[in-house]
Amino acid sequence: MRRLLGLENVLSIGFCGPTHDERSWTFDLDPGGVDPVLNIPRLQDAYFARFPKYPKGITVPAIVDVPTGQVVTNDFAQMTLDFSTQWVRYHRDGAPRLYPEPLRDEIDEVVQRIYTEINNGVYRCGFAGSQKAYDAGYDRLFAALDWVSDRLANRRYLVGDTITEADVRLFTTLARFDAVYHRHFKCNRQKLSEMGVLWAYARDLFQTPGFGDTIDFVQIKQHYYIVHADINPTGIVPKGPELSNWLTPHGREALDGRPFGNGRPPGPPLDGERVLPGHGALAA
């Protein structure tokens, strides 16, 4: 969302590494392991600056106020809506309308189901504590994936004829599906690459500037397979799946739809924010 709307110049970013210990995320990917703007080694420092005895988990993403060094929010769901509604004066020229007012009720309805049944659905499977809970979670997840697949069969995007908040929310889970969720979380009825409509839809978005050029598959796999030691005690990170198939033709241009509406795509990623060669299909 930050890249699609062009907020890079007003919202700097510190890169946490893909793994962390019990003390929270560290800025492993920044020079010297320190956030270059906040000058802190751990994200928890920003949480403790505001709440010295903060009792909950230290989560990403988080927005931090630079002058005070205090965390402002870690509400990722509201964060992207705020980017579309509260940060408008900072949007780049040609930024898309990802949360257009006439479609907000429909977007909210679709996003709510995606969030509860798909974004959270994969975790419901992966962290199930019993066979009964896993079976129920599995059925809910694939019922929802079938629902979005049916919805996308004859339309290019989830709501309206342009990319919206709803597409961004679904894409984040689809991008990780074959690399992580299918095996690691036992979401194995099918791979994404075996779901015709959703696989074409995911490739369409991936090949759209602002989507695939933000995806680092190596870091995604390292996080899940190393940090979740209770699920993967060996810590072995799979080499696959093959990434080049993300760049194969998807054919969805034949459906009505204008990715950026009356706007235009974002430019190339900023220096220092590019996915490393070999870490993503676009950088392979």
Image: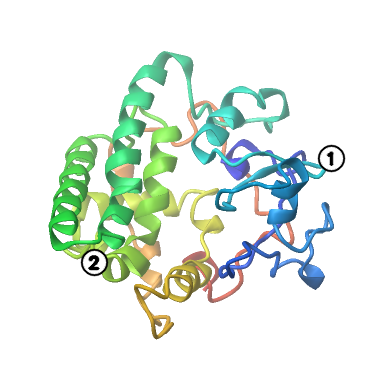
The correct choice, above or below, for 4 with respect to 98 in the image is below
Contact check, label 1 and label 2, Cβ < 8 Å: no
SS under mark 2: loop
Which residue lies at the image location 71% right of the left edge and 44% below the top edge? Answer: 8
Q: Position of residue 84 (x, y in %)?
A: 57, 28
Could you say which disc has been placed on residue 68 in the image?
1
Q: Position of residue 165 (x, y in %)?
A: 45, 33
Q: Position of residue 229 (x, y in %)?
A: 42, 75
- For the N terminus, the image quarter is top right
SS under mark 1: loop
| Neighbourhood count class around disc 1 (C-alpha, 10 Å): few under 14, some 14–19, many 20 upward | few
Residue 256 visible to an observer of this rendering? no
Q: Nearer the viewer, residue 153 or 184?
A: 184
Q: Position of residue 254 (x, y in %)?
A: 28, 41
Which residue lies at the image location 25% right of the left edge and 61% below the top edge? Answer: 129
The correct choice, above or below, for 3 with respect to 131 in the image is above
Which residue lies at the image location 51% right of the left edge and 60% below the top edge? Answer: 215
Could you say which disc has been placed on residue 186 in the image?
2
Residue 178 visible to an observer of this rendering? yes
Which residue lies at the image location 62% right of the left edge and 67% below the top edge? Answer: 17
Q: Nearer the viewer, residue 237 or 279?
A: 237
| Neighbourhood count class around disc 2 (C-alpha, 10 Å): few under 14, some 14–19, many 20 upward | some
Quarter of the rendering containing residue 166: top left
Quarter of the rendering containing residue 207: bottom left
Which residue extends farthest top? 102
Q: Nearer the viewer, residue 225 or 130?
A: 130
20 sits left or right of 250 in the view = right
Could you say which disc has been placed on residue 159 in the image?
none
Q: Amino acid at mark 2?
A: Lys
